[in-house]
Image: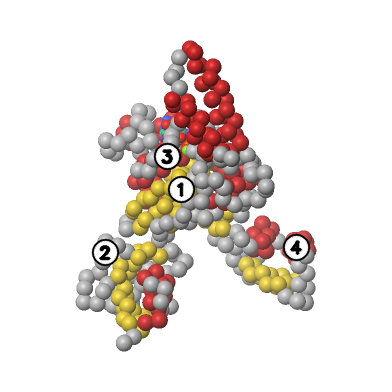
Amino acid sequence: MATLMQKIKDIEDEMARTQKNKATAHHLGLLKAKLAKLRRDLLEPPSKGGGGAGEGFDVTKSGDARVGLVGFPSVGKSTLLNKLTGTFSEVASYEFTTLTCIPGVIVYRGAKIQLLDLPGIIEGAKDGKGRGRQVISTARTCNCILIVLDAIKPITHKRLIEKELEGFGIRLNKEPPNLTFRKKDKGGINFTSTVTNTHLDLETVKAICSEYRIHNADITLRFDATADDLIDVIEGSRIYMPCIYVVNKIDQITLEELEILDKLPHYCPVSFVNLCNFPWLICSAHLEWNLDGLLEKIWEYLNLTRIYTKPKGMNPDYEDPVILSSKTRTVEDFCERIHKDFIKQFKYALVWGSSAKHKPQRVGKEHLLEDEDVVQIIKKV
Ligand SMILES: Nc1nc2c(ncn2[C@@H]2O[C@H](COP(=O)(O)OP(=O)(O)OP(=O)(O)O)[C@@H](O)[C@H]2O)c(=O)[nH]1
Ligand SMILES: [K+]
Ligand SMILES: [Mg+2]
């Protein structure tokens, strides 16, 4: 049986082959209706239940980091992918133009960043509406999410998208709750806190625990945690992800509105068409605005660490850094990236740069590296 994607393609091909005239108008209309129904089917959840990736979503992870574009239909996600990566993803004025996950690559400051264009999601996506489940489970595999918003759509859209992501265990611009939760065999619920709490008391904590059939546990808060924070820790499998709100189509709003948007935390206004409202904003001959600003922000939010290797007796290789994430950036992580067995030959490392106290500093494998450090590994003989 032909897959939905194939059926859609067949109809699109047939439409392209069909000449437009009075005699074919009826047939073309029929094809359009079929196409619309197939698109809707594709947006229905799979009948056999379960989330996971679906048709056309199994894009292999590549590069140093992955960034996903999430938003309502027609906010300009595909336009953004095309402009940033030079990859082709279809752009059109109708909703649900993009039906699968389309990857592109941005090479920025020596790092290869995979950017994923995703189908638009609709409210209720997390509950199985549309392709939302696939979109959001793909979003979970990213290192940073760009929530794309349309500047002239209601600001409430931001909250709606956030809710969909939150419903799938994604936490945006938030650190994992600083609290420990340790199950034990006996002793009841022991609840302590190193700060004043305004949200949680022993009773609430006990109630939450009993919902999970947990009757013995040590819970220590190191910040003013909410019930949601505690539940997140008990549930586990939460993903804490940086997020940028990309407000597109700012050519459609006034300068006053733009100034307000520009001040909001985590926001990055952009536009991909001629800014006739704001001629003074155009910084080059391009018909787009603030792509550089967006790239810089993505870089900042990914928080990557570039390490330059220095072979003995040679200059550092500044062209091709090893890219580490902010969470795994020890000398050992660096060695692992070069070769999985490399650490076995490790004796010590020489490090130049902001993590080094001397020029160079001799360090062990636990040493934490900083962005733009230069590293030379000395092997055992
Ligand atoms: N005015 C204006 N229109 C834009 C801008 N960026 C994109 N568009 C238009 O918005 C429409 C939708 O763009 P797409 O890139 O297809 O949007 P999308 O979010 O990928 O849409 P789906 O794949 O259907 O979810 C197209 O007609 C674009 O030309 C912009 O900055 N300003
Ligand atoms: K569209
Ligand atoms: Mg699209």
Could you tell which of marks 3 and 1 lies nearer the N-terminus?
3
Could you tell which of marks 4 and 2 lies nearer the N-terminus?
4
Q: Residue beneath label 1, please?
A: 116
Could you tell which of marks 2 and 3 lies nearer the N-terminus?
3
Q: Amino acid at mark 1?
A: Leu
Q: Residue beneath label 3, please?
A: 89
Spatial separation of the CA atoms under disc 4 and disc 2: 52 Å
Residue 153 image offset from top left, x and y in percent:
52, 33
Q: Quadrant of residue 359?
A: bottom left
**Total numbered labels:** 4
Residue located 40% across and 32% down the image: 251
Q: Nearer the viewer, mark 4 or mark 3?
A: 3
Quadrant assignment for the N terminus: top right
Q: Secondary structure at mark 3?
A: loop
Q: Specify few, some or many for label 2: CA neighbours under 10 Å numbering under 14, 14-19, or 20 or more.
A: some
118 lies left or right of 352: right
Spatial separation of the CA atoms under disc 2 and disc 3: 33 Å
Q: Amino acid at mark 4?
A: Tyr
Give the colour scheme of this rendering. Answer: secondary structure
Tell me the number on the disc at residue 318.
2
